[in-house]
Amino acid sequence: MNEAVCIDCMEYMKNIPDNFFDLAVVDPPYFTGPEKRGYYGSKVSKIGVHRDYPLSPEWKVPDFDYFSELVRISKKYIVWGCNYYNVVFSPGRIVWDKCNPGSSFSDCEIAATNCHDSVRLFRYMWNGMMQGKSIADGHIQQGNKHKNEQRIHPTQKPVALYAWIFSKYAKPGYKIIDTHLGSGSSRIAAYDAGLDFVGCEIDKTYFDLQEQRFQAHISQQSLFVTGG
Ligand SMILES: C[S@@+](CC[C@H](N)C(=O)[O-])C[C@H]1O[C@@H](n2cnc3c(N)ncnc32)[C@H](O)[C@@H]1O
């Protein structure tokens, strides 16, 4: 099973039994829509990502009820942007070093997890057209821009980040949920890893874009497998 649902994740989670998912990997918005628009400034980024999309009126920063539901439905969690929420998480942290010193964006992003108590580091370049070469050589820039991941969402995370997460934190047969799917990077990485996956995305524009991206990915994979 690998599916995306265009729905408010609070609505989706209501109908899910306790501990149904093995792992939740989530990246909720930490700004409301209008603040976000102001924060990102121009309507189209330098690398052509549209920021002038219609924002869903239901988009809101997750509150206590969201996190209560999340820990109810999933045995383990990885919550990106944990430093922005007034919530007490388990002590484990994952730091993603974006290898972009000098940019005005954050050098790193931080996730809270109950998968371990320690702090783990993943290095993968992610700054406009500058992207990492591979999971192993993430600190080295990909030389061939044609191999760069296409950017369709202003806060898109690389597929490589999710591929690394699943290689470390998921086991075969795991059921994964991403409550805030965005560009669908997590969905693509789960598909490649052969994991069961559900993603929720409230915004129809992004839902459609991630669906196109996912379908393009799987048809490319099947061409590769069949050699066609
Ligand atoms: C920070 S972005 C996620 C980016 C994603 N990790 C990626 O790699 O592209 C948050 C996404 O959550 C969506 N969203 C906001 N509120 C939501 C809700 N209540 N339920 C489902 N999706 C929501 C937004 O439309 C946005 O696409």
Image: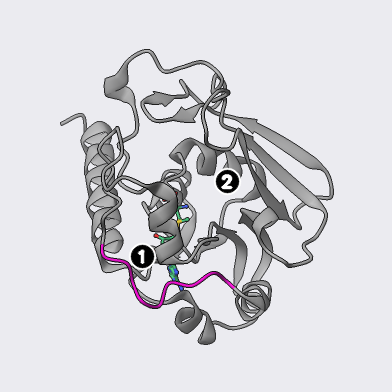
Residue 94 vertical placement versus 113 (above, below): above
Asked whether residue 105 appears in the rendered view, the answer is yes
Rendered image quadrant of residue 52: bottom left
Check residue 204 for magenta coloring. no
| Residue highlighted by disc 1 | 4
Q: Residue furthest top?
A: 143
Which range is magenta? 54-62
- Find residue 166 and name its label: 2
Count of all numbered marks drawn on residues in the image:
2
Between discs 1 and 2, the one toward the N terminus: 1
Badge 2: few (under 14), some or many (20 or more) residues near its Cα, within 10 Å?
Answer: many
User: Residue 109's x, y, as percent?
Assistant: 62, 42
User: Residue 131's x, y, as percent?
Assistant: 43, 25
Rendered image quadrant of residue 107: top right
Q: On the picture, is 25 further left or further right than 188? A: right
Q: Residue at x 30, y 36 (%)?
A: 150
User: Residue 53's x, y, as percent?
Assistant: 26, 59
Element on which disc 2 rests: helix
Q: Residue furthest left?
A: 228
Q: On the picture, is 69 further left or further right than 161? A: right
Which amino acid does the dot numbered 1 rest on?
Ala
